Amino acid sequence: MKIALTGTPGTGKTTIGKILRDRYGLKVVDLNEVIRVHKYYVEWDENRDCLIVDLEALRAHPFSEDLVLEGHLSHNLLVDRVIVLRTNPVVLRRRLQKRAFSDKKVQENVEAEILDVILVEAVARHGNNVYEVDSTGTLSESALVVWEIIQGHWLERFAAGQCDWTAYLNDA
């Protein structure tokens, strides 16, 4: 089974991916590394300070079965299940600031989290195979929830639509 582990930057994808690999023995692929190594990008966007990814080239990559694709674009790929990590916008802002993101980049990502951008994209592409995990607390606990969802447990409990950050719109 191919699993997409996605979410706004700063929601814990990489850390949870490492826990899934180290604690549960899952094969976890860093999608950003695949993009860089195989040059699945068309240019650097100076304004947004990021690569413009060639999604068609990325979709054509021969990923093996039984793995977790970790990255904020993984929900754009052909996968069996999508797990979207969500983080309270106040906590997300702090995490991104600790990473020394520019103020503009922090704001863009906090707004994307509040507006469910990745969740909406994932549901549009994968329908009922999308699950949502609040990763605001400890990432170790969140990794356990992700593991359980991968195992097929608690699916109804973590169906898309569990997190609502719209109350933070005025604070964004």
Image (tube, rainbow, N blue to C red):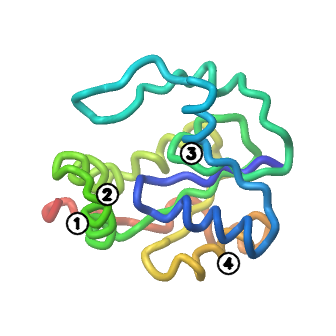
Q: Please identify the quadrant where the C terminus is shown.
A: bottom left
Q: Which mark is drawn over residue 168?
A: 1
Q: Earlier in the sequence, mark 3 or mark 2?
A: 2
Quadrant location of residue 110?
bottom left
What residue is drawn where x is 64% and y is 62%? 17
Q: Earlier in the sequence, mark 4 or mark 2?
A: 2
Q: Which mark is drawn over residue 144?
A: 4
Task: Report the Cα–Cα distance between label 3 and label 2.
Answer: 16 Å
Task: Report the Cα–Cα distance between label 4 and label 3.
Answer: 23 Å
Quickly name the residue at label 2: 114
Quickly name the residue at label 3: 123
Q: Earlier in the sequence, mark 2 or mark 1?
A: 2
Helix, strand or loop at label 2? It is helix
Task: Report the Cα–Cα distance between label 4 and label 2.
Answer: 24 Å
Quadrant location of residue 155?
bottom right
Horizontal side, residue 108 vs residue 42: left or right: left
In the rendered image, residue 57, in percent from the top left (x then y), is placed at 63, 20
Judging depth in this view, the residue of 11 and 34 nearest the camera is 34
